[in-house]
């Protein structure tokens, strides 16, 4: 069946198209044009979103949970409810993100998540739900000094053998690895993970500048929640952040909730990474979308009050949603909604090697998109051409 969608404008997101006509067939974009140039094909139902903007669905490459569910603990049957929660906030695809936990519990969680990823390719006739597209291992190869709330007893020295066990448990669905490059053994794991097309992201790290450079040489090409859980920037001894901000071949992500990083420093980050390489993440945990209280982040107990998630006084993930992150970018900087959308769509897809199918609206891409108000509010989310 073919469906055509129209609205006031479309962000591809690199281009803006007025009066777009997006023809969708079998869950994919079959054609994109401006309406006056092409009438709706006769055998096609037309859905008109009026004054709104169509943009690619948001991708969240660092999310631990939401709606009361934690991705390391949720069952296969519960995960679609998490996906539905994400889609309400404009997300159509995500990387289920682990935290440092007991290795056997991690392997079991990875097997469950691999099942969910393989199942998500099947059509779901019901409500739109963001699809798990891969796994992000945030740990266990993190710096003790910059571990944040990751439990110290579960941090592990990087070895190719442990990385391979994690990889096998996840049946190859590991798409992203956050690692501290200064730990002995890390550079070998960075090289091996890169060979397997994993996006290696440096983070939870106390690295000096030369080690950050070594990590990039070994294959690291991204940075995890820039500024948070990192050796702070010193203008004479810049450390890891000096490399992350100055290396134009690296992308980097940031939590734009106004709590993890001040709005002024968010602006500095956006100026240095630019609209091509800045990536928005939420780092959201299970309390997202829920009332204040006590929640789980993997094995970690987290208290949430007034929008802050903490464990023993340290920030423990966020309760940010991706639509709010996008709007915050337009508030904290002079970026347009189009550029802010790019940082939540094409840029994460480029960073993790998925931009052929996700993160942009072009012929052949997944028909995953969000319908936005002029202020960036989510009016509708469509996944695989379904859900309007
Ligand atoms: Zn995280």
Image (tube, rainbow, N blue to C red):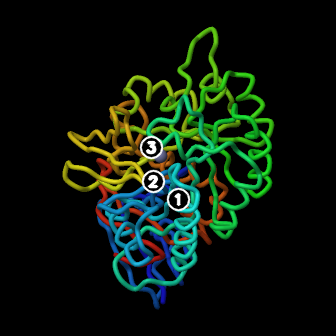
The residue that label 1 is drawn on is 95
Q: How far apart are marks 1 and 3 (CA)?
A: 20 Å
Q: Determine which quarter of the picture holds residue 68.
A: bottom left
Total numbered badges shown on the rendered structure:
3
Q: Residue 30 in the image: x percent, y percent?
A: 57, 76
The residue that label 2 is drawn on is 63
Residue sitting at the far front:
153
The residue that label 3 is drawn on is 340
Q: Distance between the residues labelled 2 and 3?
A: 19 Å
Label 1 CA crowd tier, 10 Å (few <14, some 14–19, many 20+): many
Rendered residue at 34%/35% (across/down): 312
Between discs 1 and 3, the one toward the N terminus: 1
Between discs 2 and 3, the one toward the N terminus: 2
Left/right placement of residue 278 relative to residue 78 reads right
Rendered residue at 67%/50% (across/down): 199
Nearest to viewer (mark 1 / mark 3): 1
Determine whether label 1 and label 3 are within 8 Å by CB: no
Q: Residue 75 in the image: x percent, y percent?
A: 42, 73
Q: What is the secondary structure assignment of the residue under circle 3?
A: helix
Label 3 CA crowd tier, 10 Å (few <14, some 14–19, many 20+): many
Rendered residue at 43%/35% (across/down): 335
Determine whether label 2 and label 3 are within 8 Å by CB: no
């Amino acid at each position: 069946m073919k469906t055509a969608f129209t609205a006031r404008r479309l962000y591809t997101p690199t281009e803006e198209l007025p009066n777009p006509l997006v023809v969708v067939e079998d869950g994919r974009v079959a054609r994109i044009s401006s309406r006056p140039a092409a009438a709706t094909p006769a055998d096609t139902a037309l859905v008109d979103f009026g004054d709104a903007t169509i943009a690619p669905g948001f991708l969240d490459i660092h999310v631990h949970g939401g709606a009361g569910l934690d991705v390391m603990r949720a069952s296969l049957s519960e995960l679609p409810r998490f996906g539905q929660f994400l889609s309400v906030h404009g997300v159509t695809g995500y990387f289920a993100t682990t935290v440092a936990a007991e290795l056997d519990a991690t392997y079991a969680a990875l097997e469950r998540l691999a099942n969910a990823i393989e199942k998500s390719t099947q059509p779901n006739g019901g409500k739109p739900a963001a699809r798990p597209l891969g796994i992000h291992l945030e740990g266990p190869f993190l710096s003790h000094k910059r571990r944040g709330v990751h439990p110290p007893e579960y941090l592990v020295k990087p070895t190719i053998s442990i990385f391979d066990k994690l990889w096998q448990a996840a049946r190859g669905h590991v798409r992203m690895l956050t690692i501290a490059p200064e730990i002995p053994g890390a550079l070998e794991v960075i090289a091996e993970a890169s060979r397997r097309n994993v996006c290696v992201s440096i983070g939870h790290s106390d690295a000096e500048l030369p080690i950050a450079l070594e990590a990039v040489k070994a294959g690291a090409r991204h940075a995890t929640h820039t500024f948070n859980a990192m050796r702070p920037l010193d203008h004479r001894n810049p450390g890891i952040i000096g490399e992350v901000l100055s290396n134009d071949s690296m992308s980097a992500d940031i939590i734009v909730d106004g709590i993890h990083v001040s709005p002024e420093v968010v602006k500095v980050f956006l100026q240095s990474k630019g609209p091509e390489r800045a990536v928005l993440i939420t780092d959201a945990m299970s309390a997202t979308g829920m009332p204040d209280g006590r929640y789980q982040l993997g094995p970690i107990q987290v208290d949430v009050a007034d929008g802050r998630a903490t464990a023993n006084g340290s920030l423990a993930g966020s309760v940010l949603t991706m639509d709010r992150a996008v709007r915050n970018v337009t508030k904290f900087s002079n970026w347009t909604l189009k550029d802010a959308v790019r940082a939540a769509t094409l840029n994460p897809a480029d960073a993790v090697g998925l931009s052929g199918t996700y993160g942009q609206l072009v012929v052949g891409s997944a028909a995953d998109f969000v319908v936005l108000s002029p202020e960036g509010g989510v009016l509708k989310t469509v996944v695989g051409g379904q859900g309007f």
